Amino acid sequence: MTTAYKILFAIDLQNEYYANGKCNDISIIPSADTALLLKNRQMLYRMVGNKFVVLIKVNDSSAGTDADKPFVSLSADEKYVFFLQLEKPVFTTITNIDFDLFSGHRFYFSNIFETKVGTRLHLSAPTDAYDNAIAYKPGDMVNNATATVFECIRSTTGNNTGNAAFWFNRGENTFATKKDMYPFITRVTNFKAKTAATFFNVKVFAFNPATGLYDKAVKIKNDEINAGSIPTKNVQVDMSALVHGRYVIKINGEDHESGTDAAGDPIPFYLSDEVVNSNYFGVVEVFNHNAADADFSLLDSSGKVKDTINGMGKSVWLNYIIQFAGKMATWKYIVRTGKVISIEDETAVYSFAKTTVDQQDIFESNIPIRLSEKPVMFDLLLTNAVSSQPPPAPNPDPQVTGIISRNTSNDYYCTIYLNY
């Protein structure tokens, strides 16, 4: 019997800012434990452009019913941890992300969410449904009853997705959002209990892929802590025995002070010294589990890899997607000479209102416009036309420092100075 290598899975990084949709701004790096696990399972990995590819040694066709099964069996409870490393800072300018959250949060993506759009398998969590009581700010994403995704373009509460003044239709899609961002902490961390005490009983629970709950009790080094004679809320917890992963914690039977969301559910954290200390952009966890949607499982129902040739003679394999949305902002053109009459959009999708402040004419788009590598075409109508064809208005240059700004309402602006 001979062996061969086939693709176990790939992670496809996408960003709609780029004309080809490919995101080459981020690299994917296995954790040290995962690199060793991949080696022991006779797997190889490569970053190829915007794709991270994991290959595995499999039995060849001479193995009969064992053909295309892993040469070294995979355990049902295995998971593979990968770090996201930001390579190009311009990503933060062109992409719809809440960069303020990065002071304590990072992205977390996983096949455990089983987010499918058509046949596309996403590693981000499903988009939340619109809630009339929530205060939304620009960049927030919701879906409506028809699974269409909308992006908030003006801060609002109570204006539903049918109001185009506040929401932009993103179609049947899904993107990485702040819902995919978790608190990331180190293995020795100070928590604040809800109730002051002199003794603390600490219990930590890991995420259980079989149930989708944080119900797997794990042992930590100091689960009983004597804090002294004076009651306190401060509790230092040593979790150095735990592996990378998502957890929740109970202190004297309660969640810690910042440990519940608006619905009262525990907020999980991600435990990783490496991510916090190395300032990685986020983490991807791929589980080898029997997914409710079999398309997300690493192997098919017979235990074989999914790298095959389809009926059209094309290679297909398990392909996970992480898709980032392009930044949307109001475009504001500044004209110092008064030689621009108007800025026109031939498609009539956008219009520009003119105001004059301190002898400068300002042309501001009626709604935010998505930044894109493919230029958006606007015409400059001049007081003294130099030809029958109006010159084009320049698009924002994301490489210019400070091109994106934000006001107190969290509205984003691109300021573009014209030489006319």
Image (cartoon, grey):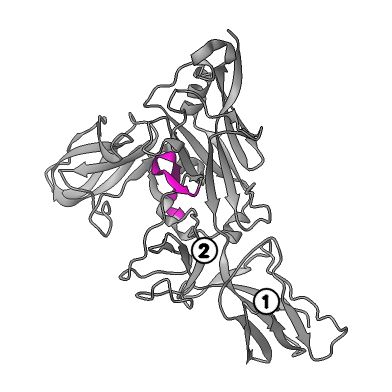
- Report helix, strand or loop for mark 1: loop
Q: Earlier in the sequence, mark 1 or mark 2?
A: 2
Q: Is residue 347 above or below residue 8?
A: below
Rate crowding at label 2 as few (under 14), some (14 to 19) or many (20 or more) other CA atoms within 10 Å.
some
The residue under the point 63% across, 65% down is 371
Q: Are marks 1 and 2 in contact (CB under 8 Å)?
A: no
The residue under the point 58% across, 60% down is 326
Could you tell me residue 166's position as x and y percent?
Answer: 46, 75
- Report helix, strand or loop for mark 2: strand
The residue under the point 25% across, 29% down is 219
Magenta residues (range): 102-118
Could you tell me residue 140's position as x and y percent?
Answer: 44, 64
Tell me the CA gap for discs 1 and 2: 19 Å
Q: Which mark is on residue 170?
A: 2
Occupied quadrant, residue 316: top right
Q: Is residue 60 visible?
A: no
Q: Is residue 222 left or right of residue 340?
A: left
Task: Check disc 1 and give the amino acid type.
Answer: Thr
Task: Check disc 2 and give the amino acid type.
Answer: Arg
Q: Is residue 48 left or right of residue 113?
A: right
Rate crowding at label 1 as few (under 14), some (14 to 19) or many (20 or more) other CA atoms within 10 Å.
few
Query: Which quadrant is home to the N terminus?
Result: top right
Could you tell me residue 302's position as x and y percent?
Answer: 44, 23
Which residue does the numbered mark 1 point to in the structure image?
347
